[in-house]
Amino acid sequence: MKKIILAILAAGALISCANRQQSPVLIQRGIPADERNYDVVQEGFGIDATLKKIFLAGYIAEGMNKNMVNLLWGPPDRESADGLTWEYINYKTEEVITRLKWEEVDPQKFKGADWTNASKLVAIEGDPYGGSPPPPEVDDEGVY
């Protein structure tokens, strides 16, 4: 009986993960909101305060690193060979929801923060909110 229950739970978890990975709302693919605060507090040393605020609100912005975007939206659906272009796809329509362009980061520019082998988001093409509604308050510079 326990094996049957465990098998049902495991199957449910796999279906849930598969649906999560294919969601057209990209924030649903990443970590839950309550875990974002922990990540910023524990791992966010050296990250700009404005980017932390945007991250906690569940949105991406130019200047974020790949780890932050990956936590918010999950891994990209397609990635260029050099890793400098990420695409997130709507699986129902096969259209690109959002395309992200990255720039390699010189670790020497980020004193005190470990940006080794990291990249900085330099351009967002397509839906900048990844299928989510726009944030309630955005100024002309995209700051929440």
Image (tube, rainbow, N blue to C red):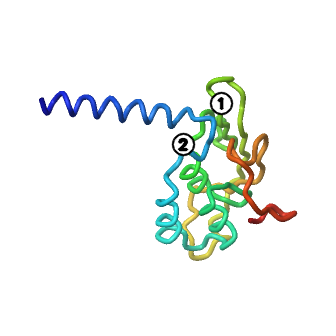
Question: Callout 2, which amino acid?
Answer: Arg
Query: Is 92 left, or right, of 20 in this rendering?
Result: right
Q: Residue at x 63, y 24 (%)?
A: 92
- In the image, residue 108 above or below residue 66: below
Q: Which residue is found at the position 74% from the left and 59% from the top?
A: 136
**Residue furthest right as drawn:** 140
Give the amino acid type for the residue marked by disc 1 in the picture: Asn
Q: Is residue 18 above or below residue 29?
A: above
Residue holding disc 2: 29
Q: Position of residue 25 (x, y in %)?
A: 63, 40
Instruction: State the CA–CA distance, disc 1 to disc 2.
Output: 12 Å
Q: Nearer the viewer, residue 81 or 68?
A: 68
Please give the label number shown on residue 30. none
Query: Disc 1 designates what residue?
Result: 90
Q: Is residue 56 left or right of residue 32?
A: right
Give whichever of 86, 109 is nearer the camera.
Answer: 86
At x 69% / y 70%, what residue is drawn? 50
Which secondary structure lies at badge 1? strand
Instruction: Please provide percent x and percent y for residue 135.
Output: 72, 57
Quadrant into which the N terminus falls: top left
